[in-house]
Amino acid sequence: MLYHLAQLLLPHVGPFNVLTYFTVRAGGAAFTAFLICIVWGPWAIRMLRSLKIGQYIKKDHVADLHELHKGKSGTPTMGGVMILGATLVAVLLWSTLDNRLVWLAMGVFLTLGGVGFLDDYIKLKRKHNDGLSARAKFAGQMLAGFMLGGYLYLNPIAISAGHLQDAGVPDWQAFAIELAAGAEQPADTPAGLIWSRLDEADKVLLQEVSHARRISSEDRADIRRMLRTEMNEPDFYDAKAWPPETLNSEAAGLFANRDSLSTLEQVRFHRLLLEQAFPDSIPPTQANRHTSIGVPGFKAWFLPLGAFYVLVVVFIITATSNSVNLTDGLDGLAAGTGMISIFTFSAIAYVVSRADWSSYLYVTYVPEASELFVFGAALLGAGLGFLWYNSHPAEVFMGDTGSLALGGAIASLAIMTKQELLLPIVGALFVAETTSVMIQVAYFKATGKRFFRMAPIHHHFELLGWSETKVTMRFWIIAFLCALMSLATLKLR
């Protein structure tokens, strides 16, 4: 909202320009969400306590754990509404309301928050730890996944390579020679057409560069500038230079819809024309990047999934939200580790929203992801504000309302920054928690004994004698190290 207000007032009040920077708005969103939680928190906790919305502690199966946690009985739960409310207000206030990625992220976040709210409400009404059935909960998670996956499949948010970047041309010297050779070629050839469109100063510069012994970074920047200008022009395509029947399948598909192409799709079409015109200088780039998944640590490994990508999105949303839900068992554990993941993917959103940084790091460019940085900052502020009251000894628990929503937000950030396979590294602690439950169940069914003293694994360490705060702090440390490892893989590309 403030962004759009700034756009209206900017012609009259210059300082409002600061609100057009998404980095400034991200800081504002984080502070606003944090402040809302801090101010609203005591009232919300009193309200939940007055409604007798308290946690029930089971004594079944593990009496030792009940002895450790029995003091938490009656602590207000469903505190996730604080995170949901604060994030929503901050996003509406500081984000650009015409950014579709923000609405997609908020849609998943609120949908899973709603599923968690129903689960918590049923538990409290029955005064029992059994809420929604597993089938109903999975149905809600899968619905959110299908909604997000289906939209992303039909409406790409990441266009394959467009404007040339430094790393996109292996031999700039050879490329400059090919471009300069257009001076001797007819205007109905690609090189001749491009040459004819350049102004005289650029023609002189290109001739000088093509005869130089070594091409400098400034020269490469000048060539990219020339081509960027031409590729931005709607009339760059000429049927004489690129007959329709010679276009590859991707270019032909874009050509068929050339009157309704977005700016990004138009630039992508023109990039394909350059790849066809100069195959020795510009390597072909992968098509359909929006349904492909990059492999961390490898700059050119992408798994093309096509329509199967929708099912992958469903799996990521479901698995991540359940993993965070399983982690929510100790004071501050899910909130703290969740905020580390949110911070990591928010930083990645900043990187992939910049064409220069994404090209340098060989990650998929997602131009609209800048507002995901604002969304992530708002959620980070809300999570830290909630953690103020959730730290040991907790005054409020987030419940499934918060844990499912938080897991959905982490998953949607990973998906919409096109770093899906980075999620198991960033959220390695969540993976470990889920894996411990799977091992426990499988081992018990096979042997009738327990592999861990109790699962999820944070309870195992409690029963080994670790204090609750020690488990939480050590798990935070592990989560932080995993986040650093994940960011390191970006440079390894």
Image: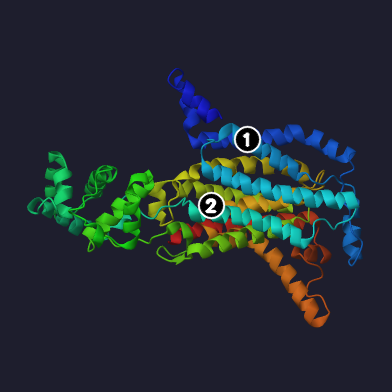
Residue furthest top as drawn: 12
Which of the pair 287/358 is nearer the observer? 287
Which quarter of the rendering shows the N terminus?
top right
Q: What amino acid type is highlighted by mark number 1? A: Ala
Give neighbour class at mark 1: few <14, some 14-19, many 20+ (Cα, 10 Å). many
* Residue at 57% over, 46% down: 104
Residue named by callout 1: 90
- Distance (Cα) linking label 2 and label 1: 25 Å
The percent position of residue 76, horizontal first and vertical second, equals: 84, 44
Left or right relative to 32: residue 229? left
Secondary structure beneath disc 1? helix
* Comes first in the chain, label 2 or label 1: 1
Left or right relative to 454: residue 7? left
The percent position of residue 414, horizontal first and vertical second, equals: 56, 54
The percent position of residue 24, horizontal first and vertical second, equals: 52, 34
Which of the pair 287/364 is nearer the observer? 287
Q: What amino acid type is highlighted by mark number 2? A: Tyr
The percent position of residue 355, horizontal first and vertical second, equals: 39, 47
Residue named by callout 2: 151
Q: Is residue 297 above or below residue 267?
A: below
* Residue at 59% over, 62% down: 424
